[in-house]
Image: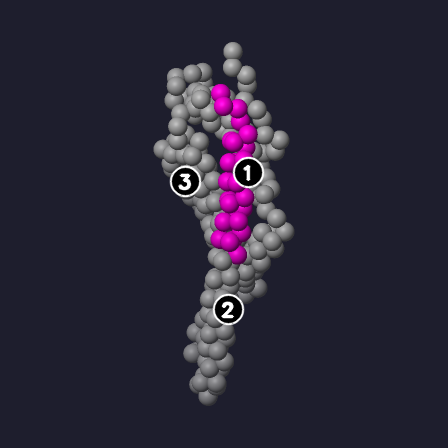
Amino acid sequence: ATAPPQKYEDKYVRPSELLEEEVKKQEGGDEAEEKPMVPAGEVFQYADSTDKALMIVGFVSAFLNGAGMPAWADVFGRMIDELMGNPDDIQENMSKLAQIMVYIGIGVLILSALQVACFMIAAARQITRIRQLYFESTVKQEVAWHDEHKPGALAARLVGDTKVIQQGINDKLASAVMNFGMFVTGYALGFFHSWQLTLVMFGTMPLIAITGGIMESVLTTATTVSRKGFA
């Protein structure tokens, strides 16, 4: 009997376990066991202090970037109100509001570039570190372990799995934080100007939640199919 593959010391890097399910399915073996979902916090376990600092800056930039759109809409609404006000003060007031809109646009432009750059750099650094540890784990396995697996399967899983992780922690995460900032700021301004109408708008939240759940289900299914194509 062949000795079992040697396990790598790092408990989070186990390529033999990652490949076991795919090998059993491809070779007609027993059905693989369902693996539990990885907690969200463990996705960032390979982030060092530099990565964490980049993500913090990215989170703040993304939130403020999301707040820019409701703020711009608020200023635009004030401009509409000025058109219906005193004609003698329209030019001066409109000039001030236009300057505010320009400042908001410049801020959004800078924050957008900053949030994408921070998250992309942090994600690339973490994925590089994960791939290095993954490769170190595979070279520590016994020769018999490599004989039991199909050529190219390890490289395919290495690329496919890390690609999924990278897509989850790069600028897509920044977009989620930006949308959250837009949501919070928008409703905050809504309650400030008209809390009665804002409460009525809350009635659409169940519909939005259902739509978001459907979209998440479709995207999860597409990701699963994509991963099976790499294996």
> In the depicted view, which residue is nearer to us: 82 or 22?
22
Q: Is residue 176 visible?
A: no
- Residue 106, percent from left and from top: 48, 71
Which residue shows up at 51% across the image and 36% down it? 135
Numbered disc 3: secondary structure: helix
Which residue does the numbered mark 1 point to in the structure image?
133
Q: Main secondary structure of the magenta part?
A: helix
Q: Which mark is residue 43?
A: none
Numbered disc 2: secondary structure: helix
> Label 2 vs label 3: CA separation?
32 Å
- Residue 155, percent from left and from top: 42, 34
Which residue shows up at 58% across the image and 58% down it? 57
Which residue does the numbered mark 2 point to in the structure image?
107
For residue 149, above or below residue 126: above
Numbered disc 1: secondary structure: helix
Q: Is residue 71 visible?
A: yes
Q: Is residue 123 magenta?
A: yes
Query: Mark 1: which amino acid?
Result: Leu
Q: What's the magenta region?
A: 118-144
2 vs 1, front mark: 1
- Residue 110, percent from left and from top: 49, 66
Which residue does the numbered mark 3 point to in the structure image?
219
